[in-house]
Amino acid sequence: MKFIFVTGGVVSSLGKGLAAAALGTLLERRGLRVTLQKFDPYLNVDPGTLSPFQHGEVYVLSDGAETDLDLGHYERFTSCVLTRGNNVTSGQIYETVLAKERRGDYLGKTVQVIPHVTDEIKGRITRNAGSGPSDVVITEIGGTTGDIEGLPFLEAIRQFQLEAGVENVLIMHVTLIPYIKAAGELKTKPSQQSIAKLREIGLQPQVLLCRTEWPLDLEIRQKLALFCNVPLHAVVEVRDVAHTIYELPLTLQDEKLDDTVCRALRLDTPPADMTEWRRFVERVVHPRKHLKVAVVGKYIDLQDAYKSIYESMTHAGAANDCGVDIVKLDSEDVTEENAAKFLGSVAGIIVPGGFGDRGIEGKLVACRYAREHRLPYLGLCLGMQVATIEFARHVCGFKEANSTEFDEKTPDPVICLLEQQKEVRNKGASMRLGSWPTKLVPGTLAHRVYGADQAEERHRHRYEFNLKYRPLLEKNGFVISGTSPDGRLVEMIELKDHPWFIACQFHPEFLSKPNAPHPLFKGFVAACLTGLA
């Protein structure tokens, strides 16, 4: 097994996760079995309790793990199926080490960062690295070189490299080559300093990914190679892609990154066949049709908060040969009075998930607008709960209908806390999480969209549809089109007299891939196009 470690320097947000995912794409298409994982230095046990404003979306795996959003890139760009072992945090490491100390596993020894913490990190590098055997394990190290919290991870890599053999380990460093406008020059000094920090720890990168806004000429590449002690062919230019992140594997292939990596790790493989991937990118970059879709959310100011939704719309748009322009609307800004101004020009509306009562009324307005104006509507998790509340209020006459999450004293709790959640006190990893089956009702729109009797989807929620209100809502045209196999939990709803109105309690955005778009998103985009015809 070969191991690739991806580190970052100079500044954060350079795209280490995308670089790792794109490299995974290339290696898979060379016939290698690849898995990816993310090591985050923060002390949270997982991102599940972090605000989207702090950390972007929480990406949920099939086994219920709440993980970093980079794992979404890993699953979208490759065929690997990840588990909770693929996202490791300092919080998990220290929690495990302290539990061992309390049990007496260390036989009275003084517990220290070296060797006890670093040994635990090294064990996680190979443990649970995917669902099956792998030829290559790509591990992204979160944070920036020089951060104090990241030092134990870098030290663990230094030790691991000696134990696994240098011929089996490659370190790829992502760095920034800034352009100083006043001087009219690209500067390599920050990268030199970043590499110097790694060398102090005992790590020497074999590949340098250089994020830059300008082309790297031969002189700059030679300077980086000389002062960073990296072969010239391993100095890789990485400029921002022009249209879509899915261009990145192609640009890295043009820079011969996969050739460099395979040569360094002594992997004898044929060139990557990117034909299908190029075809997908071509559909994204040059679509024949265009439409606008509104996403009405409460974390809309942060691009990464709804990352998987935006990517799923890209996949669905390409499948329909359509470019999708996302109109991002803060639900706190949407009111009954201005709804037409915000929503009058869009072909469809998506209401995504979220927690808390802030912005809920704006989501209700968007949902009502879609229902009354017969616009295609896709509600995700909270988006299903909002659709239920809106229908109960404005169609069934329950004027104060609400979720007990937002109003514990509502006289009509059409959405209420899951029974098994009522005794939960700890917030972390305590929701209904992971993949659960949904039984689809024959003859419904959901059944037609999926083309199946059952679906497996990923969940992350505490509140559910209140079955007490089912007869009253159904009497007025509300359709429950998907439930748990035992019928006790409502998973999907739609409206009888609407051309395309679907909402689900789960998160379909976590299962969409570039050349395998999720059927709900694909069907939603197709419905939006039908409405424009």
Image (tube, rainbow, N blue to C red):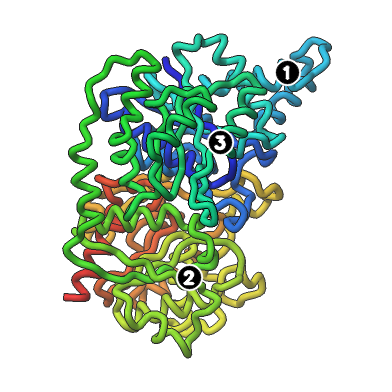
Q: Amino acid at mark 3?
A: Ser
Residue 98 in the image, given as x and y percentages of width and height? 76, 26
- Which dot, 3 or 2, sits closer to the camera? 3
Name the residue rendered at 39%, 57% in the picture: 310
Residue corresponding to mark 1: 114
Name the residue rendered at 74%, 22% in the picture: 113
Q: Amino acid at mark 2?
A: Val
Q: Secondary structure at mark 2?
A: helix
Residue 473 in the image, given as x and y percentages of width and height? 41, 74
Residue 35 placement, left or right of 267: right
Residue corresponding to mark 2: 386
Q: Secondary structure at mark 3?
A: helix
Dot 1: few (<14), some (14–19), or many (≥20) neighbours within 10 Å?
few
Dot 2: few (<14), some (14–19), or many (≥20) neighbours within 10 Å?
many
Residue lying farthest front?
183
Marks 1 & 3, CB-CB < 8 Å contact: no
Earlier-in-chain disc, 1 versus 2: 1
